[in-house]
Structures are given as C-alpha cells and as structure tokens.
Image: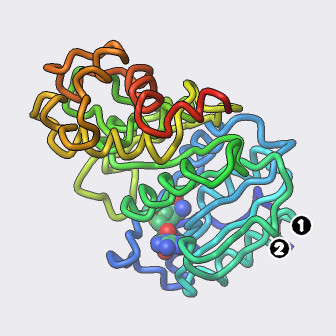
Amino acid sequence: MNTLTNLPPLSQVIAAHGLSARKSLGQNFLLDLNLTAKIARQAGDLTESDVLEIGPGPGGLTRGLLAEGARRVLAIEKDTRCLPALQEVAEAAEGRLRIINGDALEIDPLAHLTPPIRVVANLPYNVGTELLIRWLTPRDWPPFWQSLTLMFQREVAERIVAQPGGKAYGRLALLAQWRATPRIVMHLPPGAFIPPPKVSSAVVHLTALPEPRYPADPKILERVVARAFNQRRKMLRAALKGMVPDIEDRLRAAGIQPTDRAETVSLQAFCALARLMPGGAEAERG
Ligand code: SAM
C-alpha cells in the first residue's frame, strides 16, 4: 500500500484518471507539492485541528494538509471524476481523510467535524466569495471555524484586507475585518496552476475574533454599509438619505462628517453609526 510520501506525482494522477481541467468547475490545479505544503503551513498548526477542505480536485493541497499533520481532513468535491484519485490519498492517509462528493454550497459538513476546525480551500473564485460571506455571517458568533485559509483572485484578496481610502475598500473589507483578522499570506502567479488562469491569485488567512471588533447589530451594520457603498461616490448625507430623517445629526454623533464619502469611513465609525440607528443601541447591551 502507498504511504503519503510515495504516492505518484500529481501529473501522473491526473493523466491516469483522465482529469482534464473543466472550466465550468473552475478547475486550475496546483501540481507542485512543495507549494501545496507551503499553503497548508499558512493555515497554522494543524496537528490539533480538523480541517475542512473544499474542492480538493486531484488532491495536491489535501496531501499538503495531511503531510503537515492535520488531525483529520474532511474534503468536499463536486467532480465525481476526482473521487478515485482522492480515494488513493485516503488509503495512504490511514483513516485521516474522509471524502464527501457533492456541492459545498449545499452540504452541511459540521456533523463530520470536531472542533477546533480550520477551513482551507483553493476554490473557484465565485464559490469562494459566496462561502466566505456565509462563513462570516452565521447566526451566532463565534463561528464553527477558528481560521479560514482561502485562495482568491488577487483583486478579491485585496478587497478583503483593504483599509479606508482606496477603491478596494468596501463591504467585503468591512465584513471580513469586523469579525475576523484577515491577512494576505501568499501571492501566486498564473503559472503556478495547470491550466494557468488569466489573473494572479493570493492566499488570504482569516482568524476568527472571539467577538466582533466593535459592538453593532449585524443586520443594521450590513444595511448601513450596503447603502453607503451602493453610491460610493456620493457624500454620506446623500447616500444614506431616507434611512432616518435626522441622518446628518447621527453621522456627526458617530464622528463622521455628513460630507464624507463611504470609502474614507473606518469600520469603527460605521459600527458607531449602526449603534445610533433605530434599534442599534441593543448591540451595546450585548
Ligand atoms: N484543490 C485543488 C488544487 O489546489 O489543485 C483543486 C483546485 S480547483 C481551483 C477547484 C476545485 O473545486 C475543483 O476540483 C472543482 O471540481 C471543485 N469545485 C468547484 N465547485 C465546487 C463546489 N461547489 N463544491 C465542491 N467542490 C467544487
């Protein structure tokens, strides 16, 4: 039987199982096991964690996670063609890898995982962003995960970590930074993938905060931020007009000039404004 170290190279696995990359599934594979081990290391110490991997494909990153000592890996893959290749990794991993075939947007993996849980994924970008937003907006906080280590199109990664004052700053930055600490930990050129995508990529590592950085009701904060950035070129007194009659007074009370634009306003100030909106003071009392 194979062990993890003598499994065949990924190029052979792909050829043996006929895994020609499908665009419809966003398949850009990582074949360099040094690189996948490096990505796995960005997720932190895995030896005491269960890892949820979404979109393992032929299993390059999966092998990296197992080689880095993950206590257990649960991998959810939509493409049935990848299952025999993943089964070979599971056999070599001697009980540490479990594979589920299905759509990560529809499967609830929690029944199969024991905390602490770290999530690691190299996913198609649209699925990655949708899952990130779901993972950041659960009903209760703290969430099921301790950290997320996710590959994104570089431009999306920059939007997640953006600070006030630039074009990249918006809803995604505020959402991610309110409840987590996101960092870009790696940049990857298109040539790192087979086939190469059109754009560069980056790995973002997010650690969950035990509680949101500043108090605010999640729904009110989301509403204020959405309104503010829907018309990001407008001054806030115009963009938020109609939310409440005395919006200018509330903006000033939150330390925001009514003539400011959304992209210059800090997360802290948006949270202060959310607390000053009708129903928003509840958040302060927890
Ligand atoms: N992790 C592998 C790697 O790094 O080489 C594959 C990465 S490839 C960018 C994305 C993988 O996600 C593919 O294997 C694809 O089939 C899978 N995938 C796409 N959509 C998915 C979904 N909704 N649920 C689960 N897996 C999905």
Q: Is residue 262 among the parts visible in the rendering? A: yes
Q: How is the image coloured?
A: rainbow
Q: Is residue 163 above or below residue 26?
A: above
Image quadrant where residue 89 sits: bottom right
Residue at the image point whose x is 60% and y is 27% from the top: 284
Residue at the image point whose x is 80% and y is 49% from the top: 70
State the separation of the CA atoms marked 1 and 2: 6 Å
Query: Residue 243 at x, y = what percent?
Result: 27, 42
Name the image quarter holding the N terminus: bottom right
Disc 1 residue type (three-letter): Glu
Q: Is residue 31 among the parts visible in the rendering? A: no
**Image marks 1 and 2: residues in contact by CB distance under 8 Å:** yes
Q: Residues within 10 Å of mark 1 (few under 14, many from 20)?
A: few
Query: Residue 217 at x, y = what percent?
Result: 53, 39
Name the image quarter holding the C terminus: top right
Mark 1 within 8 Å of ligand 1, using the beta carbon? no
Q: Is residue 164 left or right of residue 58?
A: left
Q: Nearer the viewer, residue 19 or 27?
A: 27
Q: Nearer the viewer, residue 50 or 229?
A: 229
Q: Is residue 109 left or right of residue 177?
A: right
| Residue behind mark 2 | 91
Q: Which labelled disc corresponds to residue 43?
A: none
Residue at the image point whose x is 44% and y is 23% from the top: 272
Q: Is residue 20 above or below residue 26?
A: below
Query: Residue 32 at x, y = what percent?
Result: 52, 52
| Residue behind mark 1 | 94
- Secondary structure type for disc 2: helix
Mark 2 within 8 Å of ligand 1, using the beta carbon? no
Q: Nearer the viewer, residue 173 or 234?
A: 234
Q: Is residue 34 above or below residue 114?
A: above
Disc 2 residue type (three-letter): Glu
- Secondary structure type for disc 1: loop
